[in-house]
Image (cartoon, grey):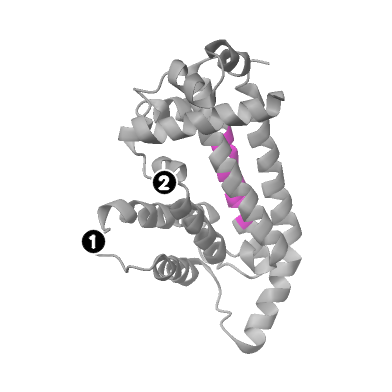
Amino acid sequence: MEQAERGERILAAAGELLLAWGYRRVTIDEIARRAKVGKGTVYLHWRTKDALLLAVLLRNKARSQRRELERMRADPLEVLPSRMMCGHYRDFLEDPVLRAIYTDDSDILGRLNDIAKKELAGLMAEGERVLCRHLEVLREHGLVRDDTDVTHQRYALMAMATGFFMAEALFFDRAPDAPEVRADILAHTVRSALETPADSGPLADRARAAAAAAAPEIIALYERLDELSAQEMHRQLRQ
């Protein structure tokens, strides 16, 4: 079995057990048993249980980032905050690990969330810087309002997304049934708060042209963030 394939099997097993049992109950012994490898083999890849489970979180976040990049490359309008957040929301709904991360699910993550905030502080700070520059580029191209501080816009965007993510657990019995409807509500909320009007006709054509002009720099920002995520994954490895 090749090393990379073996590492993926261990990550997959760790992710399944984290969701099923929660951080506190997961052991390296059980991860090894589910991955059908020896306990020592797990430690050949990751120094500690914490490093392995952090790698699970990083892997799932990185997958979402790569899907975001794919969407931006396929359609420049995906760089708009409303479209980007809609994509994040769909990824969130489809991935139970992301749901645990974004809703700070203590039953699943336990103290792993606190460990992640400490170990991944640099990466998280870079993600915020990238988002801020993303908004600045959109402002330069007339796609996002410029009547308030860009850091306030970043905060508003993060708060709106967090609110919709948390609502999945808090208001599940009062939300529209279809995920597509909830995604549309999120997109409309972000669009109304941050973006300049571009609904139809010439305005929509200008918005598409502006998005196409802004997209290369924004895509490069997220490509760099993806590289940093991969470096952090490697840092968690024993070798």
Residues at marks 2 and 1 touching, judged by CB atoms closer than 8 Å: no
Whether residue 9 appears in magenta in the rendering, the answer is: no
Q: Earlier in the sequence, mark 2 or mark 1?
A: 2
Looking at the image, is 112 positioned above or below residue 43?
below
Examine the image and state in which quarter residue 210 appears. Answer: bottom right
- Report if residue 155 is visible in the image: no
Tell me the residue at 23%/61% (across/down): 173
Residue stretch in magenta:
123-134
Q: Is residue 178 left or right of residue 14?
A: left
Examine the image and state in which quarter residue 219 appears. Answer: bottom right
* Residue type of the residue flagged with mark 1: Asp
- The foreground one among 15 and 82 is 15
**Quadrant where the N terminus lies?**
top right
Residue at disc 2, secondary structure: helix
**Quadrant where the C terminus lies?**
top right
Q: Residues within 10 Å of mark 2 (few under 14, many from 20)?
A: some
